[in-house]
Image: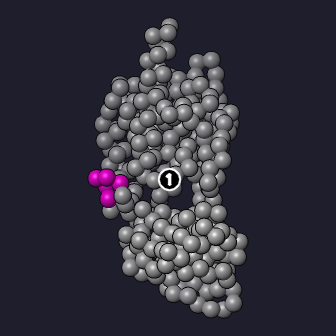
Amino acid sequence: MLFDAIVIGGSFAGLSAALQLARARRRVLVIDAGLPRNRFADAAHGFLGQDGKAPAAIIREAMCQLTAYPTVEVLRGEALTAVAGPAGFTVTVSDGRSVRARRLVLATGVTDTLPDVPGLKERWGATVLHCPYCHGYEVRDRPLGVLANHPMAAHQAAMIPDWGPTTLFTQGRFEPDAEQLAVLAARGVTIEREPVVALLGDAPELDAVRLADGRVVTINALFVAPSTRMTSPLAEQLGCAFDDGMLGPVIRVDDGKATTVPGVYAAGDAARAMHNATLASADGVLAGVGAHQSLMREVVAA
């Protein structure tokens, strides 16, 4: 069977894309490995109408709504390869089968790489956090920290006092410049240049951090911007161009979420530098609409 579109990735971006195509009565296949980036978080926040719901519950409900459309199929597994051909694209899946479609939507996401500090990994998504808009309210009025892992750490640290008293741990690597120091001072941010070497407390709770000189600083939540990499090799296999994002590569797309490879669209964290559930879902809408309209134009041109 030749599908109109294959959507690879079944989280917020991918399901939003598939929904637009399904409502346009196009035959859609969603391939999903079941390992969304947000699986480490107990709840999604700042997502209109879904605030406080578990990401897994949102995905289950969305999948249920999507599969009510008769032109939608879901394949559980990992998409391993994607190849362009004269009639469209062929995707091989981890169960050994091959599937074909006229269009591809890559909603494959990114994988986070945390700094190598003992205690970070087991607290990720609970008290070690990446986004204050997503999680800041839940840790409000507690002593908070920012672990510098990127030159933009000073900017992040200047935001965090709106949720609680803040310490920026520069790790001895990311020293704020004079302008940043002035902003941090005005915001009441404490700057600690001694590196954090361990997180303390019964994980996933966080009681404090230990510094390289042996001091212990009370911190109940720590914000860090992890570096990111593509979760899937498909965009690279297909020859899509990439741009350098703040934390890692992002697939280059236009305003309609078309990549540099004709017929391939990308949405969500893999295709934008700013990561947020609402933005991922909105990207998926644009990618689904873009893929549908390209199919429509193809018929008109013929």
Q: Tell me which residue sits at (48%, 63%) in the image.
A: 131
Instruction: Give the residue type that dot 1 points to.
Output: His
Q: Position of residue 139 (x, y in %)?
A: 40, 74
Q: Which residues are magenta?
A: 47-51
Q: Tell me which residue sits at (55%, 81%) in the image.
A: 190
Task: Locate residue 46: give its quadrant.
Answer: bottom left
Q: Position of residue 199 (x, y in %)?
A: 58, 81
Residue 238 against residue 121 in the figure, above or below = above
- The residue tagged with tag 1: helix, strand or loop? loop
Q: Tell me which residue sits at (37%, 69%) in the image.
A: 137
Residue 275 is left or right of residue 42, and the answer is right
Residue 62 is left or right of residue 169, and the answer is left
Indicate whether residue 270 is drawn in magenta.
no
Q: Position of residue 264 (x, y in %)?
A: 56, 30
Indicate whether residue 49 is drawn in magenta.
yes
Q: Position of residue 138 (x, y in %)?
A: 37, 71
Task: Locate residue 106: give its quadrant.
Answer: top right
Determine if residue 116 is in view.
Answer: no
Residue 76 is left or right of residue 243, and the answer is left
Query: 94 and 86: which one is in front?
Result: 86
Q: Main secondary structure of the magenta part?
A: loop
Residue 271 against residue 212 in the figure, above or below = above
Q: Tell me which residue sits at (60%, 38%) in the image.
A: 252
Residue 192 against residue 257 in the figure, above or below = below
Residue linked to disc 1: 275
Q: How many marks?
A: 1
Determine if residue 178 is in view.
Answer: yes
Q: Residues within 10 Å of mark 1 (few under 14, many from 20)?
A: some
